[in-house]
Amino acid sequence: MLTVQKEKGRDFLILNLTDTHLADAEWAPGCEKRRILEGTIRTLMERVRPDLVTVSGDLSYIGNARAYEMLADFLDSFGVPWAPVWGNHDDEEGPEAVERVVRGYLKHPLCLYERGPAELGNGNYVIAVEEEGRPAEGLLMMDSHDRETFTGADGKPYVDYARLLPAQLDWMKEQVRALSAAGCTDTTLILHMPIYAYRSAAEAALRAGIDGRAVTKEEADGTGVWNPGYEASFGLWREGICSPPVDEGAFDTLLEGGTTRHVIAGHDHVNTFAIPYRGIWLCYGLKTGTGSYWEEGINGGTVLRVTSRGVAEVRHEFVDITPWRE
Ligand SMILES: [Fe+2]
């Protein structure tokens, strides 16, 4: 378990970045996508002044060795610890390819990362935000893998986004239990791909007959588009929820653990919703930069405000990309 220190009486701020997704060539000097990504992160660091930065996957495309190093050097330059989990594009060439990036990352003094048990994937680890020796918050940093072969109702195999492994759910339970034993009453799961429950939550929350793609940011941040009981929801549901196609059981495991109140995912670049579902906020991190596909107005990061009692607030911090356009 890794630890970071929270000062008593002062909020601890986590800034989550996601799907930065620049390839080697896009890190070339003067490239618009690089200017936008660097400008966005610099703006967020100045505005939020975080104590910890998390990156919820798809940092680049694996194989783009220079891109991973460029991003790591850039994050290091702010003097704030940062912690990644891997996305499907980071994972898609298997553990050896990830390990090459990891060896470089572990040389970065501010990179917080543990490989975790190899049988669970590439990097499953915990960061405890400690206040006076007690974990005020536990961050479960998990690898959501890439693809998996499923069997359809017709008995035919098909490939879709992978589930968390049953052994990862056991690991989650153990970590939550260990954190609870140390006095931790609030945990957050950070991973790249949304868990299956994001689908159930979005269907339960958005009013029948409303097309998520037609909802504006202002409407989504109001109460008019959400069902009773879900009025606190905010953010957009602009594209399909690319979780695994079947329930992997992660949500029930989190409910059972009893301390997880937030999940932060990336992966679906233009979904930004946060929905309180059966006691757990299922949130998308706001996409950072214009790597891969993106949409005007959806750029920035997500802030988690941690108090002595855990995460008290999650909000998106939007950054206008106009200053860095060509
Ligand atoms: Fe992804």
Image (tube, rainbow, N blue to C red):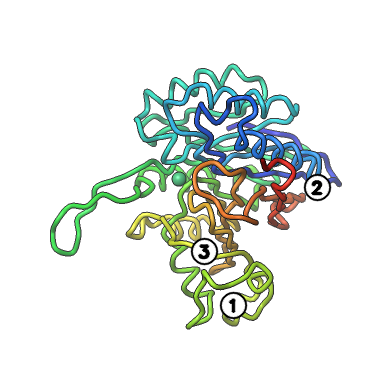
The mark that comes first in sequence, 1 or 3, is: 1
Q: Which residue is at 49% across, 56% downward?
A: 254
Assess disc 2: are there few (<14), some (14-19) or many (≥20) residues with their C-alpha within 10 Å of its C-alpha: some
Tell whether 164 sits left or right of 131: left
Which of discs 3 and 2 lies nearer the camera? The answer is 3
Can you identify the residue that label 2 sits on?
11
Can you identify the residue that label 3 sits on?
238
Tell whether 74 sits left or right of 238: right
Which of discs 2 and 1 lies nearer the camera? The answer is 1
Can you identify the residue that label 1 sits on?
226
Taking the image in four quarters, ligand 1 sits in the one at top left
Q: Which residue is at 37% across, 28% downward?
A: 95
Residue toward you, 14 or 10: 14
Tell whether 185 sits left or right of 143: right
Q: What's the distance in space between the residues labelled 3 and 2, CA to CA?
A: 32 Å
**Amino acid carrying mark 3 in the image:** Arg
Q: What's the distance in space between the residues labelled 2 and 1, CA to CA?
A: 30 Å
Q: Which residue is at 56% across, 38% downward?
A: 126
**Amino acid carrying mark 1 in the image:** Trp
Which of discs 1 and 3 lies nearer the camera? The answer is 3
